[in-house]
Image (spheres, helix red, strand yellow):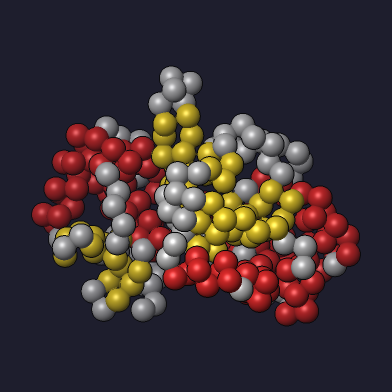
Amino acid sequence: MNCLCEKLAADIENLAPACIGQLWLFKDLPAETLAAMSQTAVRHRKGKGEALFLQGDPAETMYLLKGGRVKLSKLAESGEERILGYRKPGDVLGENLIGDPAHYPCSAWCLEETLVCGFTRQQFQSLLLDHPHIGLQVIKNMGERIAWLTDQIGNLTVTSIEDRLHRILHSVAREQGKVDRRGLILDFPLTHEELGFLIGAHRVSVTRAMAALKQRGHIRYEGKELIVCPPPGDDNPPEE
């Protein structure tokens, strides 16, 4: 168990308000509201290789990833696993419960020891009834999230495999990596097969595209770290 997991396991009650406050869905809510919400939050710890939820399960719980890293994947009709993306601490999973009863469209697999907190559908509905202003803030935050998702979809409409891969690498590094004086750093492994699923291309095409991006200076390796330069037109440099 890493230090973060030990800290959370030993004192998880004290961390609950900060935990709920990190949900993008509930950002900018007043402290007293977050304190009330934290009292009803569910908390779970999962081991490496365990699933938070599986594709097709009833979408009855929304989670905040507090510690660890999660892979989202979907099984095609052929039985082939398609990787949709990765989530890091601070990301939310299972927003499906906000709408009508539905099922999780993908599976969430823990890549390491993982800690989560969140709400069941019933708990979330009760919170909205008791605190109507939560609903107004949720609507605002969801609007911002839709704008971000629209940008992500735009990455998939780029016709060049090299450009599409560059944008996806930059997006993953911005969301899941870190930043320092060198730029955006992707510091966990992604296979060419996994990248192929993310951009909709064969592994061989990804290998060629990676070589082209490296030759153009858009990416470079320093040890096991991948440094990703911003794609053309990116006007929002990350803050160190």
Q: Is residue 16 positioned above or below 164 on the image?
A: below
Residue at position x 29%, y 61% in the image? 187
Q: Is residue 104 above or below residue 114?
A: above
Q: Total marks drawn?
A: 0
Q: Quadrant of residue 172?
A: bottom left
Image quadrant of residue 12? bottom right
**How far across and how far down the image is residue 125, in percent?**
82, 54
Residue at image location 88% in from the left, 64% down from the top: 130
Q: Compared to 82, does 80 lie above or below? A: above
In this view, the residue in front, 238 or 193, is: 193
Quadrant (top left, top right, bottom left, bottom right) of the C terminus? bottom left
Q: Residue furthest top?
A: 78
Quadrant for residue 169, please give it: bottom left
Residue 159 visible (yes or no): no
Q: Position of residue 173 (x, y in %)?
A: 35, 60
Quadrant (top left/top right/bottom left/bottom right) for the N terminus: bottom left
Q: Where is 34 relative to 92, above or below?
A: below
At horizontal 27% and vertical 32% (from top left) the residue drawn is 202
Residue at the limit of the structure toward the right, as seen here? 130
Q: Nearer the viewer, residue 84 or 81?
A: 81
Task: Pinpoint residue 13: horizontal percent, then vertical percent.
Answer: 67, 71
**Which residue occupies 24% across, 46% down?**
162
Residue 11 image point, x, y percent: 61, 73
**Position of residue 58 in the picture relative to residue 166 (left or right):** right
Q: Is residue 10 visible?
A: yes
Q: Is residue 172 left or right of residue 137?
A: left
